[in-house]
Every structure is written in C-alpha cells, then in structure tokens.
Amino acid sequence: MIDFRPFYQQIATTSLSAWLETLPLQLKQWKKQAHGDYAKWAKIVSFLPDYSAEIDLREKVEAKLASPLSEGETQHLVYHLKQLMPWRKGPYHLYGVHIDCEWRSDFKWDRVLPHLSPLKDRTILDVGCGSGYHMWRMVGEGAKMVVGIDPTELFLCQFEAVRKLLNNDRRANLIPLGIEQMQPLHAFDTVFSMGVLYHRKSPLDHLSQLKNQLVKGGELVLETLVIDGGVNDVLVPADRYAKMKNVYFIPSVAALINWLEKVGFKNVRCVDEAVTTLEEQRKTDWLENESLIDFLDPNNHSKTIEGYPAPKRAVIIANNP
C-alpha cells in the first residue's frame, strides 16, 4: 500500500504543518473505504523497476537512460503500466514508452503557462489533479512543493507509478481527498482548479474553498467549461452533458467572473478561451473508453450529442486580496 508518512514528515516544518491535525486520520479512514481494486493497483506500482534516470519536466514529462531498455524490459514496463488503464491526462515519456493519454494535457499547459505568475519557489495546490501531469510541469517550472488532491484511487496509483519512474521525486505529492475535506490552510501561493468547477453542485462553495487555501495575495488559476453569453447566462444541463452525468453548471465567462468577485477574489481576468478539439481529447491505445468524438453530434461537431454547445474552456486568473 502507498505510504503517506514521507509526506507528513515533509510538511511538518512548513506552512502546511497545520494540516497534520486532520490529514493522517482522514487518510486512515480513506484506506478503510478505498476502491476494491486499490490493493491490486498499488501492487503494480511496487512491481515497477527503480532506475536512475535523466529527467525533463520543463518541456515534457520524460525520463530516459543513457542506454535504452531492452525489448524485454520495455515490454515488461508497458505490461505493468497498461494494468493501470485508462490513462486520461498526459502524455508521459518514460524510458522509451510513450503513454499516449486521452487528453493532450500539454496543450492546456501551453495555453495556461504564459499567463501565470512565476512558479519558482512557490507552494502549489492542484485541485482535481488526476494522475498528476500538470503537477510535474509545475515542478519543471521550479515550484518548491506541489500538492495535488484527487479522491480517485486509480489516479493516485498512476501518479505513484510515474513518480517512481521519475527517480521517486518528492517535490510533488498526491493526496486522495477532495477539497471539501480540507481545512482552510491559507498556505498555498498558487491554487489550480482545472476541469473541476462544472462537476460541483455548489460552484460558489467550491470557489470559496479554493480561496480558503490561498495566502494573502495568492493566485488562483481556474480552468473550466464555459458557454457564450452575458453575466446572467448559465447552462444547467437537464440530464447529461457530453455523456457526463455529473455536470451541473456551465457559466459564461462574464457570469464566472461575477461569481469569483462575489466570493471575494480581486483582479479577476479571463486570459484564454478555446474550443476543445479532437486533437486535444481523443481515443488512444491507453484508453478503452469513449472519447470526445463519441460525445459530439456526428453531423454537427459544434454541438454535443445532447444538442448543447460543444465543450469550450476558459482560463480565469484571480487573486486573494
């Protein structure tokens, strides 16, 4: 099983130390209720080899050796990593194995990065981090510590698999909880919430929870689905949106800015809007499930299969005063 004690030791003398009042007990309870396959997935991580690699996290997430793996070693690595499918956020380049994930998350990172305050020496929270792709890119930008939270056990094991293959790098850590389980720490210089807001039944509560994790003057990076429209325009899907049943509110950019200002954020600005393309989200050999092409109207890709506007995403940056 995955051991969180190194993380406890890591934060004991930092601004996150107050988290130790609640976190160990929460994770003890989490282990009791974990997914039935968690033990199997965690064991797969333990089977992965330990290499001393050359790492690149600035331009991509890559680990390589001076001499390439043998064909047998490569097949062994692919076999174990494919036991952790589906891989949704990536890509990863690990010892000649290309984990071609459903999402080209590097596309999103390239859209977001130019607008960020420098991440060097920052303590960062990534909410809904998935398998942790963006966390490694944050480390590549010089972050002092990145903490991701995501309650999905498979994502935790994918993250730990990648971490092990990245020389067991401890600058990033994934904690399998949701933000609603975190006490207000007011300890992070930057908080990311990307691809989460539309899954929340109470979006203003989510925005307040994000604000409660930031230091004064800290920066929020919010990326979410949006629709075209004015300050009062919000899509509330009747049933499913792009075949997702857990989509509750998709605001216009103007409405989203209004929400952020209502919960107390300042200097709120939209820095990017982009329609999700079939190049950014698609089926691969590392995904057995459907993908974006299956979620769109086959006769009109500007609509979802339910008839709603096709996925369009915006990046909003704001500050905690």
Image (cartoon, rainbow, N blue to C red):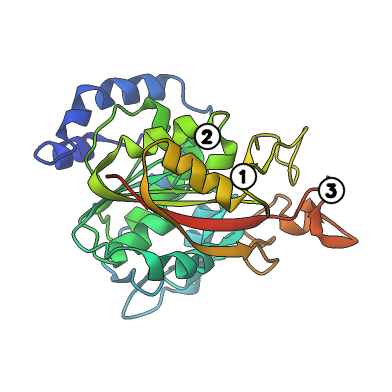
Q: Which amino acid does label 2 sit on?
A: Pro
Residue nearer the viewer, 111 or 236: 236
Location of the C terminus (image quadrant): top left
Q: Which residue is drawn at 27% across and 49% down?
A: 218
Q: Dot 1 corresponds to which residue?
A: 251
Q: Dot 3 corresponds to which residue?
A: 307
* Residue 295 placement (x, y as % from top left): 77, 51
Q: What residue type is labelled 1?
A: Pro
Give the distance between the C-alpha atoms of the residues marked 2 and 3, in whole angstroms: 23 Å
Q: Dot 2 corresponds to which residue?
A: 203
Q: Which residue is drawn at 34% across and 68% down?
A: 57
Can residue 115 be seen here? The reply is yes
- Label 3 secondary element: loop
Give the distance between the C-alpha atoms of the residues marked 1 and 3, in whole angstroms: 17 Å
* Residue 93 placement (x, y as % from top left): 45, 69
- Label 2 secondary element: helix
Tell me if mark 2 has few (under 14), some (14-19) or many (20+) residues whose alpha carbon lies within 10 angstroms of its own. Answer: some
Q: Sequence-wise, which precedes: disc 2 or disc 1?
A: 2
Q: Which residue is drawn at 27% across and 62% down?
A: 119
